[in-house]
Image (tube, rainbow, N blue to C red):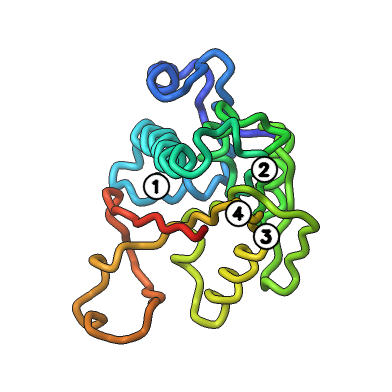
Amino acid sequence: MKTNIFVNDNPLVDVLIQTLARSPQTFRREIMAIDEMYSYVFNQLDDKNSHRALTYYYTMGRAILDTVKQFVDWHFGGFDAVESFLDFACGYGRFTRFLIEEIPPERIWVSDIYKKAVQFQSEYLGVQGIVSASVPEDYQVDRDFDLIMATSFFSHMPATTFERWMQKLYDLKSKRGLLLFSVLDMELLPPIFLGQKRGYYLVQTVKVNLSINKSMALLG
């Protein structure tokens, strides 16, 4: 599967990988041109600077790993004890390329509504792929997982499917497992929402500050 984002023999990428990756020589650095996590950042930049977009892309992937590692160390005692990991709404591997340095690819499952994203990760990163569904009732998986992670998924879920997807993923968690998910911090809500009783909101935004912070929640 071809990519056309310039990362090979790119001096900036070489320095970044040396800094961020555990094994720079074997790190899987290629990025698909249709990777939404890259294109979103690139399109948000006023100067359309590909080097800045690459820096954010790789750095965020490593930052997600560092956050997950804190939960893994606390609950499991380290990645070696995680026998099965599901990255739900995985995208094109911004995080997974760092995860495979911690967990063997055969113990990692990735899942996304986009078949090309699942195919790319399966072929390029060697992980196991599951094509997702538009509604949780159609998402059929015949096993459970020690750790399930959904990054930037529930931030986009409306009330009609939020709780249903939460229950579906929770039901796929092993008895000793964890469900991790990220949501936008309540402090980012406009003042009009403050003081209301509902527990979740779907807010349409035009442009998001790239320094935005998220909160990571867990269910055990």
Q: CA distance from mark 4 to mark 2?
A: 13 Å
> Which residue occupies 29% across, 53% down?
213
Q: Residue 91 at x, y = what percent?
A: 58, 49
Q: Nearer the viewer, residue 163 or 125?
A: 163
* 3 and 1 marks in contact (CB < 8 Å): no
Residue 41 numbered tag: 1
Check disc 3 and give the amino acid type: Leu
Q: As drawn, is 72 to the left or to the right of 41?
A: right
* 3 and 2 marks in contact (CB < 8 Å): no
Q: Nearer the viewer, residue 206 or 212?
A: 212
Check disc 4 and give the amino acid type: Phe
* 2 and 1 marks in contact (CB < 8 Å): no
Q: Quadrant of the N terminus?
A: top right
Residue 88 numbered tag: 4
Which residue position is annotated with label 2?
84
Check disc 2 and give the amino acid type: Ser
Determine the secondary structure under disc 4: strand
Check disc 1 and give the amino acid type: Val
Q: Earlier in the sequence, mark 3 or mark 1?
A: 1
> Which residue occupies 37% across, 38% down?
56
Q: CA distance from mark 3 to mark 1?
A: 32 Å
Q: CA distance from mark 4 to mark 3?
A: 11 Å
> Which residue occupies 32% across, 61% down?
207
Q: Earlier in the sequence, mark 4 or mark 3?
A: 4
Q: Residue 18 at x, y = what percent?
A: 42, 16
Q: Residue furthest top?
A: 25
Q: CA distance from mark 3 to mark 2?
A: 11 Å
Residue density around tag 4, few if under 14, some if 14–19, many if 20 or more, within 10 Å: many
